[in-house]
Image (cartoon, helix red, strand yellow):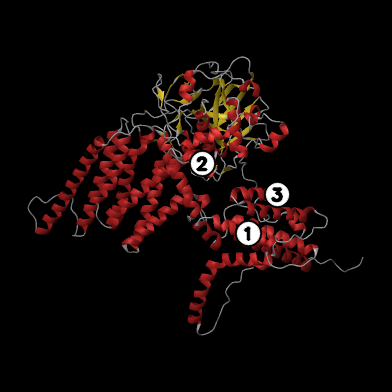
Amino acid sequence: MSGRARLALWAAAATLMTSCAMLPLVSPATWIFQAAFLLTVQTGVGALTRRVPLARPLTVATQALVTLMLLTLVFARQEALAGIVPGPEAFQHFSALLRAGADDIGRYSIPAPLSDGIRLMVVGGVLVIGLVVDTLAVTYRSAAPAGLPLLALYSVAAGLSNGGAAGLWFLLAAAGYLMLLLSEGRDRLSQWGRVFGGAARTPGPESASGVVARVRFGRRIGAVAVLAALFVPFALPGIDGGLLDGAGRGIGNGTGGGGTIAAVNPLVSLRDSLNVDEDRTVMTYRTDTADTQNLYLRIVSLDDFDGTAWKPAQRHIVDVPKAFPAPIGLDGQVKRATIRTRIAAADWYAQDWLPMPYPVSTVDISGNWRYEPVGRTLVGDHGQNTRGVRYEVTSLMVEPTAQQLANAPEASPAMRREYTKVPRSLPAVVAKTARKVTAGSANHYEQAVKLQDYFAVSGDFRYNTQVQAGSGSAAIANFLKEKEGFCVHFSFAMASMARTLGIPARVAVGFTAGTPQADGSMAVGLRDAHAWPELYFEGVGWTRFEPTPSRGSVPSYTQTNTPGEIESAAPKPTFSTSAAPSAEASASESCSSQLRKLAACPDQSAAAALGPEEDDWPWTMILVVTLAGLLIPGLLLSPMLWRTRVRAVRLGGHGRTEADVAAYTLGAWSEVTDTAWDYGIGPTESQTPRKAAERIVRLGELDPETEAAVHRLAAAVEQVLYAPHPRPVAGLANDARRVGESFRTSASRPARLRALFLPRSAVRVIWMASASWTALGTRLSARRQALFHRPSRQNG
């Protein structure tokens, strides 16, 4: 093995040995094996590129590119091209994982669970440090400065860890760095000639003195680095809370003998949960009540509003009682039913708080859990979380009437003092809007219902999970102005407005009921994550309201008008607003059975790709260069050119027969669905044209005029599909162009460029080529059978 290869191995070993200092921070520690494998590949790539040899910057660039592809293969395989080439979606996935990892670091105490986000941060960090060390020590032949990134890695890990094995990690890190220095010294000495193990007993020639000086210099640098690594962690400032709390004071690591839970905000990942590409199942449950649509699984309540954010107040926690005390404020006049729910959390779902229906009477669960009496919640202790737990909950289904809520007396002074506080920084427009919306109300109940209806029905608010949650005192005022957001905005705004009216209010975080399964159970996914306001009424207690449009279910006790009016105005109760994706995309996804029946599918022959023809002319060099100059841009622009051609055919002129009307109408509709697809809204064969139109309008956030155009196209398609004699509808091409223009106007520049040059709908070319190949094979097989298996002409 050459000296350079040996030095590369010691650089990787030093990085890995230093990384062992992070083992106490995350559990389980299996990430170290993955990091070791990827680091070995990274080191091997560096050794190969230096053997070629490549220029130093190219060597580093090649290693960085391979490292990125390795991380893509491990963490973003489904979002990458061929599973390894990262694109925009892969980088978006990396960004989402890093945000989730940062949120997990702020939420968990040591050792934190090995979530995907934390794993990416840890493994990716090791690879980045390994690349820097390899670059300095091997590529640029300067091992001494390579101690700086190793020192940074060890110092961070040692500053956060409080385990008893800190000395062992220090020895490993120091040994790795010293061996790296020794290997580099031996590599340098080998350039002077043969390296001897011992020092000369007598003064040697001048060159030997220089060699000894080099060794001594390297040892001195190593000693200084070791001493710095030993004492720097003691000078680091302490950071309290979450994973950055070395003393375990963050939530989930209590002492077991009482204590408190810290004010950690559980909303940090709610928006990311609502925007996940894959709606992973968080938990499943079975219950003995038929009214599952009102069975919200509550995690925690946020009752501390400081003008910047809602968060759980710091509360005292105790042992979990066998039977919980009666819910505060609930008297014997209110109808209630006792229900039992058996819940099983997914193995990957690690949450400190236990999701349960509210209010809970008893909980049968194993593990280290503590009870917070004010919020009636259970929180994990000593690192306990919900990962894979199974438990049974007995709870009350409280069913107050509108009259009982309207007749509720004023809350106690203590309740009003704690739960009607609003900070001075709250913009005046919040209280002003609350008074305006609830004008003419006779009691707090009517005020609450009017606030709910203002957000869900009459206020023209739009549900959009892409809106940033916002922070600061002006966030609620901005939401009231823009009228667009998701459950966090709606619940925060309604609870804040209720407090300005003197109604005790807080915000609850958890999950909606989920989706019914064929076996009778309910499945709760990430997209069922939700936040809703709880308002307090004396005699009833904390009462759920639902101001978020198109989410959850509207409580029956808030429907005070005639049932017909409420049903038509209020959002429809739903088990889940984010059903899992339908069947996998296939070649027939863009062409349903009805379209095939009408022969309205796109012509496969129109998309046939022509390959370059061979040429034997003597001036091939000039021709090859010319063709390459035309072909390469042509290949790059071929998706755009194909998409432009298809659009022109679909929206061009047509005949007057019924078949022509059908083809023209379905072509215009296909253009709309493909345009939506190009901007990220994939097609769904399982939906009717009307439902598909509603989905495009909702996800595309189209303006009213464009929304009307989409619905006109959907109505025309339904007429073609189901009417005995479809009639032509004027202006469909203009409507389709209007939809495309609306998408282009509202999209970001990267989205517009991708839709123009790399339209997602261009995958239809591959589908049509596959179908043509299959059809060709069928025809050839039929001809072979006709040639070789002709029936005999002999008689008798």
Is 303 positioned to the left or the right of 218 in the image?
A: right
Do labels 1 and 2 touch, CB within 8 Å? no
Please name the residue that numbered disc 2 is placed on: 479
Please name the residue that numbered disc 1 is placed on: 738
Kindly give the residue lying farthest to the front in the view shown.
440
Query: x and y percent of residue 244 in the render?
Result: 36, 35
Element class at badge 3: helix
Residue type at numbered disc 2:
Phe
Is 718 positioned to the left or the right of 752 in the image?
A: right
Is 676 positioned to the left or the right of 312 in the image?
A: right
User: Which mark sits nearer the N-terminus, 1 or 2?
Assistant: 2
Q: Which picture quadrant has residue 101?
A: top left
Residue type at numbered disc 3:
Arg
Please name the residue that numbered disc 3 is placed on: 690
Is 472 positioned to the left or the right of 217 in the image?
A: right
Which of the two residues, 562 or 574, is positioned nearer the viewer here? 562
Kindly give the residue lying farthest to the right in the view shown.
796
